[in-house]
């Protein structure tokens, strides 16, 4: 039987139809050769081989530090996390400033959506402001003073007005490098807010009242038994919310809010315009 030809693996560099030595194999050509082989991989291949790089010892640490400046932010993030796990002063000092950011990188920002009232109905204050971040560095968690900790008597009129305006605009909660992580946390915040007893009744929101929401239509589309038809759609809606809460069907309750009044926490993409760092203060 003829010997099968070697199939290229994620750890191989493919140049001119030839399979070069794997990045994680023997360090041929020294540190420079190791870096050159890594640079010829595409993003997916880089991510596949990086877990093995730290096993190369000092050359691996040096390569991970170099990778912190890779074009792909996903690769930079994985290099940062690998260096975090290495017990080395060189590794720790390389990441002390955070994860390098480059123009056109994307951050996924979670905003809490406040609720306003216009003397008749509630509405979502969902106009997210343009990014005017003046510096090159960003932190993952946005620290804000609690309302109870603010000395309101010490504020001049301009500072007072600024704080009042801030409460009426979407509030930036945190920034993330992975969309899926941001969406997961935003959903948890949304669920917490819709279950808060101080959150207005869903059917007191302007858009829900205007649309006269088809309660039984929504029930049918989401696999729920139909409710006895009543003239008062408001009562039918309130009964639906009460039912979902009592049965702890939080996912459906969350969907109901999003299908009607909208989410109370959203993910907004922010494009980086300058070089800087993403300062990490908690688990990524």
Image (tube, rainbow, N blue to C red):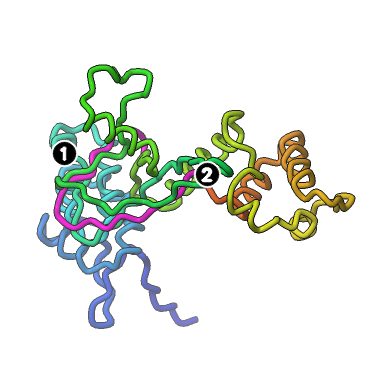
Residue 254 on the magenta segment: no
User: Number of labelled discs?
Assistant: 2
In percent of the image, x 17 and y 51: which residue is there? 63
Q: Name the outermost residue toward the right.
A: 228
In percent of the image, x 59 and y 38: which residue is there? 194
- Crowding at dot 2, Cα within 10 Å, few <14 / some 14-19 / many 20+, comes out as some
Q: Residue 97 carries which label?
A: 1
- Crowding at dot 1, Cα within 10 Å, few <14 / some 14-19 / many 20+, comes out as some
In percent of the image, x 35 and y 63: which residue is there? 44
Q: Mark 2 points at which residue?
A: 187
Asked which quadrant contains residue 201, the reply is top right
Nearest the viewer among 27 and 88 is 88
In percent of the image, x 36 and y 65: which residue is there? 10
Whole-percent x and y of residue 166? 33, 38
Q: Is residue 190 above or below residue 69?
A: above
Whole-percent x and y of residue 42? 29, 68
- Which callout, 1 or 2, points to the residue nearer the camera? 2
Q: Give the range drawn in magenta.
A: 264-284
Q: Which element type, helix, strand or loop, lies under badge 2?
A: helix
Mark 1 or mark 2: whose residue is earlier in sequence: 1
Q: In screen coordinates, is 280 left or right of 167? A: left
């Amino acid at each position: 039987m003829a010997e099968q030809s070697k199939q290229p693996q994620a750890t191989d560099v493919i140049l001119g139809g030839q399979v070069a030595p794997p990045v994680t194999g023997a360090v041929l050509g020294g540190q420079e050769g190791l870096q050159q082989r890594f640079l010829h991989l595409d993003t997916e291949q880089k991510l596949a081989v990086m877990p093995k790089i730290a096993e190369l010892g000092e050359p691996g640490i040096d390569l991970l530090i170099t990778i912190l400046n890779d074009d792909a932010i996903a690769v930079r993030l994985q290099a940062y996390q690998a260096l975090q796990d290495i017990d080395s002063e060189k590794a720790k000092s390389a990441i002390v400033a955070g994860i390098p950011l480059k123009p056109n990188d994307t951050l996924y920002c979670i905003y809490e959506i406040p609720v306003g009232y216009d003397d008749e109905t509630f509405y979502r204050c969902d106009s997210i402001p343009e990014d005017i971040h003046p510096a090159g560095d960003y932190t993952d968690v946005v620290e804000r003073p609690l309302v109870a900790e603010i000395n309101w008597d010490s504020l001049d009129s301009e500072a007072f007005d600024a704080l009042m305006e801030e409460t009426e605009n979407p509030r930036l909660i945190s920034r993330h490098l992975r969309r899926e992580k941001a969406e997961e946390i935003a959903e948890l915040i949304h669920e917490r807010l819709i279950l808060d007893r101080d959150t207005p009744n869903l059917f007191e929101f302007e858009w829900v009242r205007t649309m006269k929401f088809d309660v039984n239509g929504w029930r049918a589309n989401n696999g729920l038994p139909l409710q006895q038809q009543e003239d008062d759609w408001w009562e039918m809606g309130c009964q639906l919310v009460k039912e979902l809460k009592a049965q702890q069907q939080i996912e459906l309750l969350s969907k109901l809010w999003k299908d009607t009044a909208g989410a109370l926490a959203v993910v907004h993409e922010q494009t980086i315009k300058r070089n800087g760092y993403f300062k990490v203060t908690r688990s990524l």
